[in-house]
Amino acid sequence: MIKNIFTMMCTVGLLAFSGEACADLPKAFLSTYCIDCHGFETQKSDRRFDGLNEAITDLKQLELWQEIVDQLNLGNMPPPKEKQPGGLEKARIIALITAEIAAARAELVTSGGHTVMRRLNRFEYQQTIGDLLSLNVQAWNPAADFPPDVKVEGFDNNGRGLVTSGMLLDHYLGAAEEAVSRATHFGPRPVSKQYAQQTPYYFDGKEKWKLPKIFHVDRFRFIPDTPYTDMYGRHYRGGHIPFRPLYGGVAESGMYTIRVKAAAIDRDHPYGDALDDFRNGDPLVLEVATVDREGSVESTGSITTERSVGLAELTSEEPTWFEWTTHIDQGFEPEVRFRNGTTATKRLVRIITQKAAEHPEVAPFAEMKSGMQKSHGLLKVYRGPKLRIYDIQVGGPHIDQWPPAGHKLMYGDLQPDELNRSTITQRLRTFAAGAFRRPLRGDELSPIERMVTEKLDSGMEPLAALQLGFQTILCSPSFIYMREAEGTLDGYSLASRLSYFLWSSQPDTVLIEHAKAGQLSDANVLASEVNRMLKDPRSERFVNQFVRRWLDWDNIGEMPVSGEFHVYYRDNLETAMAGETTTFFRHILDQNLPPKSFLDADYTFVNRELAAHYGLAPVEGNHLRQVSTAGSVRGGLLTQGSFLTASANGVDTSPVVRGIYVLQKVMGYTPPPPPDDVPEIEPDISGAKTVREELAKHRSITTCAECHRKIDPLGFALENFDPIGAWRTEYGKKLPVDASGKLPSGEVFDDIRQLRTLLIERHETFTRSLTEKLMTYALGREVEVGDRPTIDRICEDMADPDQGLRDLIQAVVASESFLKN
């Protein structure tokens, strides 16, 4: 539709208007069609147009005129019930206003358009420390204790929100000290060793009294007299096994191989609803984790920190080896868990004797007094799901380079006894150039060099003084901040802007070499680098971070899901839903599919649990794979679980909240906040009224009607999806769901499928919205009026159906807004 209007503009815009004839046209048009709702007496949506001049003299007027022409192009204004301009009249006014806007842009210089000197956000700091010093920052996150970053329009890399506080500076000091310590390795190359622990995993006799209770037989763990060890419960309720040879943690951080020999026993059980948390026949899930027990209650083997390594699905009763290679941090140890065990073993014994006493093997224990004899006896004859473990083996650390690259960056080949004033200065300068992501400028390092010299003069050991210098560099503004001068970016600034856009981290050696040679100003070199970087595994950071910020995923998991939706936790749907959307985004990026694929895709990516949740054809396994959604209610971004869950609160749904979410994330429009004197809509939890009936009251309020006319239909279309994205046809009290609606432009729809068709027809609107979001993320600031011509040109190019998401990213990087500050 927009494309057709622009075609009309091109034709009608050629009509000859004299200057005098044109001068009064915008005011006359506004007076006829707009002022009644946006004038002196009434300002719907807080918009007032009666004070606008034909000559655009400031940025505020430019923004208002741009909003007017946008609403005319979208067909949202005037409202359907108001007087409407004819097609030719509308096209002429759009052409005239557009010309005035273009002329004004050429005259006005925005006060913005520059990315302020912004600090690295928490995620960028974490990744930069990891890449600079070759540290595994998934195992140790240097920014874990930093205060949360402020989000501006959903993005946490906006310089306006990234202020630095005294508390944050204290955290920088502590993180820098720890990072330098972790990256320092003067000792000999660690020796790789093999460790093994065979079943049974409990210890008896005198030896057990030297060990924590976690290695002792009790009522619900380590049933004796078996040639294997069965786990019955979930996680820390009788469903975990520690690894005795490395109890207390590995001595050296590094990559280790963990092997577990295990089998799935009695996946199909006879106990029916007694085990209501376990779907009969499901695979048993073995999880390997690394845990830190320091500071915990040692006697029980509890932990203070845990990191999941991986999962394996077991379907066979034949013992099978499973293997993972992972980083284990010093002080952490491996642990094996029954990820989807039915329940706590203690509760399991109780419910089996209470709810399944009719089974012959259970009957003898039903009336028995609680104790070791009852628990062990019942568990030995229990025919429910058990994860049987035979052997656990661990090998490592596996060392590819010694000393590691981070150590080499700091110390080169020097040993502590070779450090003197000259070599210390050399190492500081080499390290600072890497940390600052550019060559040093003049004597900018002199204050740090003087500080180190003073410490040496006061008797500090050379190694300690040098490390203090490294820590100070990691706390300096040139490391913490991205500093870009106004105007065309130099090669190093452009390299950093590009790397933080696509990798959330510092430029690599290739980018730095291009910057040094002045080659990034070559459009072909820049495009080649974008392609290289998008193929690099580090681009997963871009996919995950951009999608998270774009769709406001911080809501997911923070709002507890109602107990009636227990499958959300049982089936780990949060992880699957996030994985579905990021895999979907990655697929569109890798295949360079057009942006409208986010709306019209007839496929998605699911695992077994998510397919069942969506009502799609069954699939096997916990891994995500592409499946067709043709013929179902699913298809495109709007029907994915992450989209539907992020726009709900875990308990109920609101068409208003979801409607605003669609407007913001898909249409690129944020409606104004409601008037202060209008109460919020509270859901009628008694079920006496539908939300649609409640919203009818709001639409009867003049100050609310205009916004709700845009918001409510989009939200109504999603009402067939409950708070965790499952399909429903009625609410809890048997009230039917009505997902029909009418768009401001007059089109009607019956359900999400028909709305999706209407949105696909307007895919140019989505492409513009996505372009603005990508630009916001890439620049580290809001998109401003001065960026509009750039975005217009990109969207015109993206109208070519052969242009895909990768082309869009290339266009953002090649744009004037990206190349200049």
Image (spheres, rainbow, N blue to C red):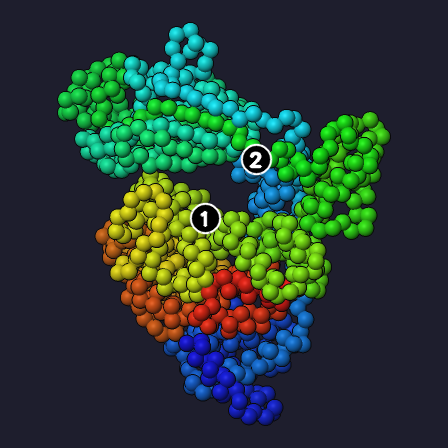
- Where residue 291 appears, x then y in whole percent? 48, 28
Residue located 46% across and 58% down the image? 589
For residue 154, above or below residue 456: below
Q: Which amino acid does label 2 sit on?
A: Asp
Q: Which amino acid does label 1 sit on?
A: Asn
How far, Cα to Cα, is label 2 from label 1? 40 Å
Which dot, 2 or 1, sits closer to the camera? 2
Identify the residue under disc 2. Answer: 400
For residue 189, above or below residue 75: above
Residue located 82% across and 36% down the image? 422
Q: Is mark 1 on a helix, strand or loop?
A: helix
Q: What element carries label 2?
A: loop
- Where residue 271 appears, x then y in whole percent? 19, 30
Quarter-of-image position of residue 373: top left
Quarter-of-image position of residue 364: top left
Residue situated furthest right in the rendering: 457
Q: Residue 555 carries which label?
A: 1
Mark 2 / mark 1, whichever is N-terminal: 2
Q: Residue 658 carries which label?
A: none
Quarter-of-image position of residue 418: top right
Residue located 26% across and 48% down the image? 618
Q: How many marks?
A: 2
